[in-house]
Each structure stands twice: as C-alpha cells, then as structure tokens.
C-alpha cells in the first residue's frame, strides 16, 4: 500500500512537492516547467546555489498529489526526482505492557472516554523523559523501594549508605546524624524510623505515576522515566 492510500495521520503536506531538477537545467527551463504543470515555487531548497548539483525546489500544486502525478513529473527529462513533501512524526511510545491502560497519559478512547483527553505524555516524551538530577519527595504511605519498576529510580541517601548505591546494608547506626537510623530511601515520620516500606500501597502507586521506569518492557510507566524518588 502506498502512502497515497493512508487515511490516518497525513503522510505528506497536501499540495506540496519537492522537485530536484537535473544539473544544467536553467531558471528559464524551470519556469517553463512550472507553467506546463501548473506549479508555483514556494521555496528554493538548494543550500549551495554555486554548486553543480541538482536544483531542489519546494513547489505547490492545486491538484491532488498521487502516484500518477509523481510518475508524470519524473518522466520529464528536466527532473531528477519528484516526491511529496513528506511529514515526519516522532512518537516516543514506551514498551511497558500496561501502558495502553494509562488513559491519563495517552487517551485513545480505550476506556470509552474522549480520545485526546490526557496530559499529552507521549508528545512530552519526544522532548524529554526525565532526569536523575530531579528528586521528587513522595509524602504518603511509604514506597516499595524493592519494586521492579521503581528500584532503579529510588533516591539513595549516600551519607547513610557509605557502601555506595545499590549496596546499602543496615548497620543500626545513624550515619548521617539526622536522627534516623538506616534511612536509605527516606524517613517514616509516623514510626520515627528510617524504614519507608509501603504498608498500604497508595504511596507506591503515587510513586509509580511519578516515576515508574519507562521503556523497560515491565509493568507501567511513570510521567518521568528517569527520576529519583
């Protein structure tokens, strides 16, 4: 199936063609070509007009662009090639298997709601997917810091964990002197300890919405694929 038969996102800008003329074709010949085919030059795409390569132009046409028109233009001896002005769509969709259920991030109407009523997360991910320089504090019921979709995005108190990231071992000491013992990932102000393991589940859910690891083919995805919680 050619691009001319697609009916979802438009494959090319309607009414616009990119035409490359063969070396040696003069401006007068190009003007005659436009007249013969009912074209209007919109922009000169030749980055170096002094070279001897082909002249590349962006032209507009009032008739519908289809393969027959392209074939007709390319059969002209003045033309090296002709093509629609293709549109490039960037879509950073994660591989996480539960992503299609997250209508708040990308709503296709999958739950019966209005398609597009979401936070435009996919469009935002085309720009950025987060940063480990960002630390988000979750004040909730705790966080399951061992969760496979969260563990690598957990903030680590390196002053309490002198062994280094990923090697924290409880020693029963308040290494950083903040009043909490072995507070590797945060503090529990209810029990006044350094153990933040979630005992209800809500905090883990919130943490996942904020920063579940993205594009790891596991579970869901957070707004920030890379972050520290």
Image (tube, rainbow, N blue to C red):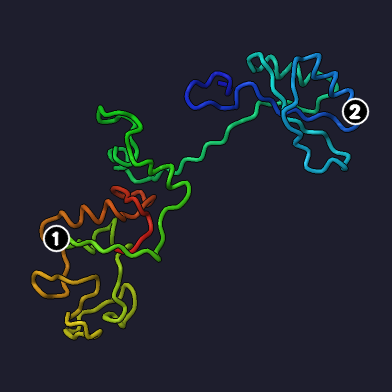
Location of residue 180 by image quarter: bottom left
User: What residue appears at the point 30 percent right and 62 percent down from the top-left corner?
Assistant: 136
- Helix, strand or loop at mark 2: loop
Query: N-terminal of the two: label 1 or label 2?
Result: 2
Task: Return the residue at label 2.
Answer: 26
Residue 28 image position (x, y, % from top left): 89, 24
Q: Which image quarter holds the C terminus?
A: bottom left
Location of residue 186 by image quarter: bottom left
User: What residue appears at the point 85 percent right and 38 percent down from the top-left corner?
Assistant: 53
Residue 181 image position (x, y, % from top left): 17, 81
User: What residue appears at the point 54 percent right and 18 percent down from the top-left corner?
Assistant: 5
Classify mark 2: residues with Cα within 10 Å, few (<14), some (14-19) or many (20+). Answer: few
Residue 210 image position (x, y, % from top left): 29, 54
> Is 132 situated left or right of 19 in this image?
left
**Which is nearer the eye, 152 or 24?**
24
Q: Which image quarter holds the N terminus?
A: top right
Find the distance from the CA under tag 1 to the CA under tag 2. Answer: 74 Å
> Is 221 situated left or right of 194 in this image?
right
**Which is nearer the eye, 207 or 95?**
207
Location of residue 63 by image quarter: top right
| Residue lying furthest left | 191
Task: Return the residue at label 1.
Answer: 141
Could you tell me if the residues under marks 1 and 2 are in contact, i.e. CB atoms within 8 Å?
no
- Helix, strand or loop at mark 1: loop
Classify mark 1: residues with Cα within 10 Å, few (<14), some (14-19) or many (20+). Answer: some
Q: How many marks can you see?
A: 2
User: What residue appears at the point 58 percent right and 23 percent down from the top-left corner?
Assistant: 3
In the displayed structure, would residue 122 be above or below residue 70?
A: below
């Amino acid at each position: 199936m050619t691009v001319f038969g697609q009916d979802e996102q438009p494959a090319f800008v309607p009414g616009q063609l990119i035409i490359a003329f063969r070396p040696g074709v003069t401006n007068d010949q190009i003007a005659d070509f436009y007249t013969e085919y009912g074209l209007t030059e919109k922009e000169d795409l030749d980055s170096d007009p002094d070279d001897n390569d082909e002249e590349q132009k962006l032209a507009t046409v009032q008739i519908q662009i289809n393969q027959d028109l392209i074939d007709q233009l390319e059969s002209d001896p003045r033309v090296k090639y002709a093509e629609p002005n293709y549109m490039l769509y960037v879509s950073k969709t994660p591989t996480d298997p539960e992503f299609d259920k997250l209508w708040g991030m990308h709503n296709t109407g999958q739950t019966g709601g209005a398609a597009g009523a979401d936070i435009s997360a996919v469009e935002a991910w085309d720009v950025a997917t987060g940063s480990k320089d960002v630390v988000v504090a979750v004040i909730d019921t705790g966080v399951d810091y061992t969760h496979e979709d969260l563990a690598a995005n957990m903030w680590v108190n390196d002053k309490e964990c002198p062994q280094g990231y990923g090697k924290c071992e409880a020693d029963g000491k308040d290494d950083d002197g903040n009043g909490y013992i072995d507070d590797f990932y945060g503090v529990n102000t209810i029990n006044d300890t350094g153990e933040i393991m979630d005992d209800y589940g809500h905090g883990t859910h919130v943490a996942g919405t904020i920063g579940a690891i993205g594009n790891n083919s596991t579970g869901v995805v957070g707004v920030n694929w890379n972050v520290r919680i």
